[in-house]
Image (cartoon, rainbow, N blue to C red):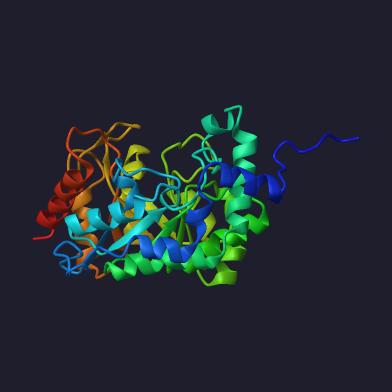
Amino acid sequence: MAGKDPTDVTRRQFAGAIAATGLAASLAPRAIAQAFETDPPLAPGSMADLAGVRMGVETYCFHDVPRNGDPAIIPMLTQYMHDVGINECEIMSAHIEQTTGLGNGWWVTARQQPTYPQERAAARQWRIATPPAYYEAIRERFRASGISIYSYNLNVNETFTDEERDHAFIAGRALGAEVLVASCTISEIPRSAPFAEKHGMILSPHNHNNIYDPDQFATPEGFERAFAVSPNVKATLDIGHFAAGNNDPVDFIEKHHDRIAVLHIRDRKRDNGPHVPLGQGDARVRDVLRLVRDGKLPIRCYVELEYGSLRPPVDEVKRALEFCKSSLV
């Protein structure tokens, strides 16, 4: 007889785990909405539209924000976006899901943890069981602060069931997002693209720089293979990672601008070099921004930071946006 799947948990076990962590009450969408009614509406941000370039921020930038269920997350994110003058974002799943950091299953190191099977199963159950109203309440909280969610970052992969993939797009729609951004493999695209089509959303793979694995998004050819799967597949081109893999982001944008949903604006050195502040690497950040401006390309440009700094994340995002602004004058 086959052994029991170690990733299988019952709904009762899952509910018990949620209750034990004290998170059950926070699943009520009205409670979330009521908890965050104090922020003022956002005035038109000076950084939201730079010479016709639609700027935003990936919430991953704010490294000091707690993750996975902390009630302080949403008010911190909205305040930070007020502080930097941005009114549109890509929101990271870890900032709104009531799951552990191992629940996504993207990184190999996470899968090596002894608690991974149980935490991965709990995350799957949470995604499937959580109603759209939970995400709608978050969307309305952002809207009340004058901020819209354009893209939802959730890393679908081969550990997802089709039911879980379906609920990933249900969540994105409920958040008001048009795009589901995923750090995923090329082989994941045929599995997830049908759900993007079903829900009228864009599936937008995010590249990294592992040019030695043919299943990774690290070259122009990888994106082109994904584009051929469905018209609902468009790139989230991380120009820093692209440059680190010795690719030219300007050349790619010129050739495929109609298949790009979002640009992640960050900088890195070539040859798998380090993350660096904007303008100090090989991602041609100024040229990229000017290409979007001059071509009047309807591509979002979202700042994403991953280099170390002694300054607070809000200050570092401000510096990055000032660099973008100075590049477009």
Q: Is residue 83 left or right of residue 152?
A: left
Q: Is residue 185 left or right of residue 158?
A: left
- Tell me which residue sits at (38%, 56%) in the image: 91
Q: Is residue 301 left or right of residue 186?
A: left
- Tell me which residue sits at (86%, 35%) in the image: 2
Compared with 281, 146 (above or below) is below
Q: Is residue 320 visible?
A: yes
- Tell me which residue sits at (70%, 49%) in the image: 12
Q: Quadrant of the N terminus?
A: top right
Compared with 181, 174 (above or below) is below
Comparing 282 with 63, the one in front is 63
Quick one: which residue is furthest to the right in this view? 1
Comparing 111 with 215, the one in front is 111
Comparing 49 with 65, the one in front is 65
Q: Pinpoint residue 33: horizontal percent, then vertical percent.
A: 39, 65
Compared with 143, 313 (above or below) is above
Q: Is residue 248 visible?
A: no
Q: Is residue 9 left or right of residue 80?
A: right
Compared with 219, 287 (above or below) is below
Q: Pinpoint residue 249: horizontal percent, then vertical percent.
A: 31, 50
- Tell me which residue sits at (43%, 69%) in the image: 176
Q: Quadrant of the C terminus?
A: bottom left
